[in-house]
Image: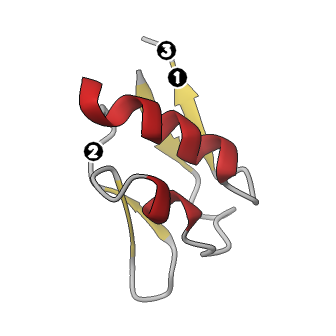
């Protein structure tokens, strides 16, 4: 699984960071920053949940 972030869509709600801070962070403007595109098994479920929480649909998952 690979996480993708479209920073042009991000509204900075921070839901992803709250859901899985090991995978997501925010820059100084509140825009999502991926700490890893390939979450480990421990973070994968929460990262998937974070994708569903994103209000602007800036996050997506790609199965590889």
Q: Which mark, by number, is residue 36?
A: 2
**Percent from the top left, x then y, of residue 26?**
41, 73
Residue sitting at 51 percent across and 58 percent down?
A: 16
Counting residues from the start of the chain, the first of labels 1 and 2 encountered is: 2
Residue 40 visible in the snapshot:
no
Residue sitting at 39 percent across and 79 percent down?
A: 27
Q: Where does label 1 land, which residue?
A: 62
Contact between labelled residues 3 and 2, with CB atoms less than 8 Å apart: no
How many circles with numbers are drawn on the protein? 3
What is the C-alpha distance between the residues marked 1 and 2? 14 Å
Residue 31 visible in the snapshot:
yes
What is the C-alpha distance between the residues marked 2 and 3? 15 Å
Q: Which mark, by number, is residue 43?
A: none
Q: Secondary structure at mark 2?
A: loop
Q: Where does label 3 land, which residue?
A: 63
**Percent from the top left, x then y, of residue 48?**
52, 34
Q: Secondary structure at mark 1?
A: strand
Q: Residues within 10 Å of mark 1 (few under 14, many from 20)?
A: few
């Amino acid at each position: 699984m690979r996480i993708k972030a479209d920073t042009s869509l991000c509204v900075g709600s921070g839901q992803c960071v709250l859901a899985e801070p090991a995978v997501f962070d925010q820059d100084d403007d509140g825009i999502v920053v991926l700490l890893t595109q390939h979450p480990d098994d421990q973070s994968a479920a929460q990262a998937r949940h974070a994708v569903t929480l994103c209000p602007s649909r800036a996050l997506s998952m790609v199965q590889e």
